[in-house]
Amino acid sequence: MELRYDVVVVGGGHAGVEAAAAAARVGVRTCLISPDLDRLGQMSCNPAIGGIAKGVVAREVDALGGVMGRATDASRIHFRMLNRSKGPAVWGPRAQCDRGLYPRAVRRILDEHASLDLVQDLVTGLELAGSRASGVRTRSGLRVRARAVVVTTGTFLRGRIHVGTHDTIPAGRAGEAPSLELATVLEEAGVELGRFKTGTPPRIDGRSVDYARVEVQPGEEGDFRFSALAWEDIPRQVPCWMTWTDERLVDVVGENLHRSALHGGALAGRGPRYCPSIEDKIVRFPDADGHKVFLEPEGLRSRELYVNGLSTSLPPEVQVAFLQTIPGLEEARVTRFGYAIEYDYAPPEQLRHTLELRALEGLWLAGQINGTTGYEEAAGQGVVAGANAALAVRGEGTFEPGRDEAYLGVMIDDLVTRGVDEPYRLFTSRAEFRLLLRQDNAVERLSGRAAELGLLTAGQVEQLEARARAREGLEEWLGGATLPAADANALLEAVGEAPVDQGVRAGELLARPAVDVEGLLAAAGASNDPRAAVPPEAKDQGWGAPWGVGHVVATERKYAGYVEMERKRAQALRRRSAVRLAEELPYGEFVTLSTEARQKLAAVRPGNLAQAGRIPGVTPADLQNLLLEVRRYEGHEKRPGSGEPAAR
Amino acid sequence: MDPDTIVAVATPPGPGGIGVVRISGAKADVVLGRLAPEAPLPEPRRASLRAICDPESGELLDRALVTRFPGPASFTGEDVVEISTHGGALVPRLVEDAARRAGARWAEPGEFSRRAWLNGKLDLAQVEALKAVIEARSPAAHRVAIHQLDGALSRRIAGLREALIGLEATLAHHIDFPEEDDAPIPVAEIGRRGRGLAGELAALLEVAPEGMLLRDGAVVVLAGAPNAGKSSLFNALAGEARAIVTPEPGTTRDALEVALSIRGFPFRLVDTAGVRAGAQGVEREGIEVARRALAGARCVLLCVPVGEDAGPEVEGFVEGLEVPVLRVRTKADRVAGDGSARDRAGATGRSGDGGADRIEALTVSAETGQGLGELRDRLAELAFGGLLGDGAPDPSGVVMQERQRRGIGAAAREVEAFARALDEGVPPEAASAHLGEAATALEGVVGVIDPEEVLDRLFASFCIGK
């Protein structure tokens, strides 16, 4: 049997789901193929979304009309704003989700997409037309013809699970078969593959925990939404718990190190340093007093707890033994054992910034296959790959968010221009403009462009417009309204700020570090409330809540000078980005560049001068000389004074 | 194109009839207008005499031939102004500095040529010749150059780089990993480490003046009344009869300059016209030249023959100078008996110069060589004392290149601003914008700091990972 679509998406994890939804929203006929349609958006590791930087990505995906924000709101059972004690630029919303509710929400949201079909099957082959991908074949003999193919296989490509040194089974996740044929097919099509590993901790029965000996960690009850553009009902909230390991665990793990798949030599691939196994932790930091362990509920109706911090590939009996050394877990019963998994990934230097393979047109890769880890990183790539696949089908250009526009832009640029040597995760320190890339302003940064591309539904566009009107109303009020000194001083004294001598503009008060939007509105009083002045549909836009429009305005006023510093540096980067580097440049002949720079540039083939500058081994001097060489190569076609920026 | 207007002395330093200061960029004419405000801009490509003045004080620096080359028909393809000043090490430098303060910036090595190439003004045959210049800009070439002078400077700079990476890693831990085993590092501690780094940067800068002098030579100006023995001393120190020496007062009308090595350090010795009241015409101009020479001096040798007074004219001439004035009793051979006697006609030195406010006078004879050894020691001590003796900074920490000095200076200011911002309660993620600027400023000195290196340090230092 043969089916025809514009875009076919292989895989139904976080990348596949977003890619399919984005393509369908742009408006092309899309098909998602996954071996198990009941597990779309499955959380294979910790059922949590967000965190520092990652939470910003979740909100960016939402601002682009994606699934993740809504599904998280609809399934979150424990929420915390990480870094709340620090400035709002580095706040990281993080939610523990119900492992069962999340995929159900994903499926419900996908089913809203009229031009998206779901097919349960395993993709085993790739159809090629010359050097273009033209569709896929499945195990059950289906041929799906498509003008664009998006592959999102996660950890399934030649996945292999290890528990101890003897027990290894081919699997993409615990209990699920790996994808073997597709790996061979990709290699035959010229895609280079590498090998990574990662791990997961055991899960235990919550009824076996002594809660008197662990510390309760209540979630935050405040108003927070990952999705600012489509509001879901948020479930009731439950607590997490925390405990610490001590020297007894060090003894048990230390005696059994040789039995670990990760340390016993059974695994060759490289694992992530920021997500080390407990074996790694005690080997690398032998003098640590202990390690934090978080017990996180897997769902409202589930009794299982995810034991965060104890990723391991030791044999089952050792896992039980070390768990039972931990205060509160003396009687712990394991429901699922931890394991290490190794899998194939495709080194991402092979990709363009659209996530299309350079060597094989019509084939996009997104998610863990590109050497990343994390649901948010996968989802973000999914949106970009899906949107670009659909745009390519329509011949409508590309969507390449910049490093100053989104963590998505930082991530994809890092992947494509630098490659990876361990599974890639986002940190704020990877972003040079972290004051611009905040969780509160994802909508302001990205949703306008998303609307242009057709990534937003009519309802989401309405919300976007309402939010913009609320912002205008607030800005106008901040610039025009004056609070009498008495009212202002009552507010200022309450928050510990220096008082004023006379009436003061609302906007000046908001620039004070300790003054927040809610306090300001309360001090201004009901008769002077900007919310009264906006149209009805703009009244509900969160205002002072961390997802709301008032928070954006307040944050920018508080950081004012520093945000400006970043904007200027971002503009300089934009000027460098404007110097395009043609794909066919003969880097080998550019003798004024160092040998290393020539090799790196030839391998990566950056699209512009800014990208070239981020390639390791390309120095500022190389960059200067590169500009000269390019000008020379182009035969001085561009006249001086044309506004072309220089490489400095 | 590059929006900056750049300036540099185009002629090699050293004695010579003229020095050419070249300005290139969109604001070249604006800069010229500020240097020569009293006359209209000269016609293009026509050499015209102009009084070049300090853009701030208005003080006359030199009378020079000025030629404008409006772009694109110029060497670089941009608007170019060339100012042909009187020669030597001093006047071109003064004019260059004035142009910088009038809106240009110092050119990077090879920058005029690079602009010429970019604008298609150089042909392919010239590219090879240019290549060496371009490559000299690379940090690798820089490192080689530095190594030739002293390998330990590289070590010190590498240490700075490590400190900056460490500071960024601390910040990354603070921001990115709030829930780990190790408690977050307090902001005050991050600030303290910032101050430490700012201090190291400042320490490198402290010996920067010596570094600059090592490159260019310390200018020592001989001053005094006519026939005070300046030219004899000049020749004695230089080891050859360069200045015309006659018993007639006022023989030296112009500033004479010679490059020489004293105790292994580079000096530029400048002989000047004698100072006296009532000088007219050419002689008065010579005195003006001498006065300008003082402005660029590292040290002044005030020559007064043994048994004579300097006189009010000469005392007035050196009064208020910010550089050390070393009094030298000349013509010791003409005095019978106690030629080695030192009198205590002290001179004020710049505070901070070895802590000596009063510098003892020396008695010398150009004829017999008496006192010259001690004078040489004293000069080496005055100009390069920062590099000598106990408690002196590590001589290898000398910052040689002006560009390095500026980079380190900018970085020191930004790191200091970072620490100050933290003190004032600015959140670290915002204050870190200053660290970003510091890393950029240091790029030419320490190389690019890669986020991966920061993460490497982070993961090596902290147990991370829930």
Image: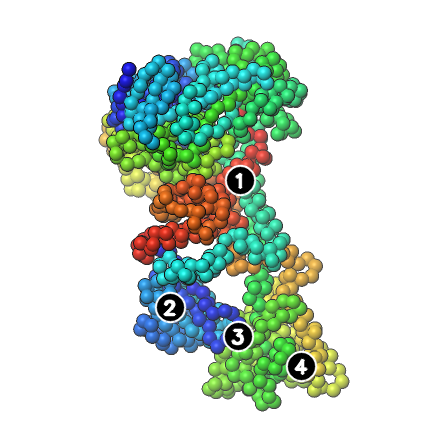
Sequence-wise, which precedes: disc 3 or disc 1? Answer: 3
- The subunit letter for the residue under badge 2 reads B
Query: Which residue carries the number 2 mark?
Result: B81
- The subunit letter for the residue under badge 1 reads B
Q: Which is more foreground, mark 1 or mark 4?
A: 1
Q: Is residue A520 visible?
A: no
In the rendered image, the residue lying farthest to the bottom is: B248
Query: Which residue carries the number 4 mark?
Result: B366
Residue at (32%, 16%) from the top-left corner? A142
Q: Amino acid at mark 1?
A: Glu
Which quarter shows the N terminus of chain A? top left
Give percent across and percent down for residue B435. 49, 45
Give percent across and percent down for residue B260. 61, 72
Q: Within 10 Å of the Cα at label 4, are there few (<14), some (14-19), or many (20+) other Cα atoms?
A: many
Give percent across and percent down for residue B319. 56, 75
Q: Amino acid at mark 2?
A: Val
Query: Which residue carries the number 3 mark?
Result: B15
Query: Which residue carries the number 1 mark?
Result: B453
